[in-house]
Image (cartoon, rainbow, N blue to C red):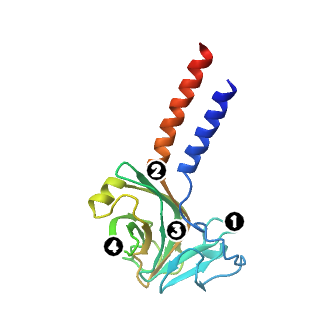
Amino acid sequence: MKRTIVALMALSGLLASANANLITNGDFEADGLANTANNIVGPITGWNDGANVRVDTVDSKLPAVPTTAVRLTGNATVYQNFTTAWDADSTFTVDFNACNVWWKSGTEPGIWVSLRSATGTEYEAQLANTAQTHTNSTYADWTEDMTWSFDFSGADLIAAGASADDELRVNFYSKNNSNSISWLDNVSVTVIPEPATLGLVAAFGGSVLFIRRRFMI
């Protein structure tokens, strides 16, 4: 019985590692900005950022708790490369929080999230349409902070030109114009299953059955 419990605990640990976040500094807290710091130009630890990318703290209208978020304006892009074992049977899940403000009718804020090659070739993109009904003409029309989750299949990435186990890039691109701002926070990228982990799970499962049968005899 004790061996069975140990094996199950090991199996649980493997499954937890398969759900580990592949992103560094996904909550943007690593640079230790004070809660009164807004409109700070990068660099952002772990991330590559270009023009029109800033860092804000709690005043950005995200939930009213101490937090740091990336401000995306004027078609801004922020991205990070990552590596992991993956193949056609894998599924990547990208989770994040986002909200925005805009002050002109006809503005359509949103954030494109894509998985790309390590050098930037886009394999697949999906849109987080953060815009809601516009009612104001001033700097006051905020969306609520929203949670977004998008899946990207390994098979689709390979069909688009990637190879299994390639280094990948998660890329966030703001579709804003000069009349809106979006905020991005709490980015997570996970993959299930990792090929190596799947093999170990199968092996551990077989071991558990063997131990259980042996002790039942």
Q: Which residue is mark 3?
A: 99
Q: Could you tell me which residue is drawn at 55 percent across and 30 percent down?
A: 207
The first of marks 3 and 4 along the sequence is 3
Image x and y of residue 211, in percent: 59, 24
Please state which amino acid type lies under the numbered disc 1.
Val
Foreground: 163 or 79?
Answer: 163
Q: Residues within 10 Å of mark 3 (few under 14, many from 20)?
A: many
Q: Residues within 10 Å of mark 1 (few under 14, many from 20)?
A: few
Foreground: 127 or 156?
Answer: 156
Image x and y of residue 147, in percent: 52, 58
The first of marks 1 and 3 along the sequence is 1
Q: Is residue 193 something one can see in this rendering?
A: no
Please state which amino acid type lies under the numbered disc 4.
Thr
Instruction: Quote the CA–CA distance across marks 1 and 2.
Output: 35 Å
Image x and y of residue 202, in percent: 48, 36
Instruction: Quote the CA–CA distance across marks 3 and 4.
Output: 27 Å
Q: Secondary structure at mark 1?
A: loop
The first of marks 1 and 2 along the sequence is 1
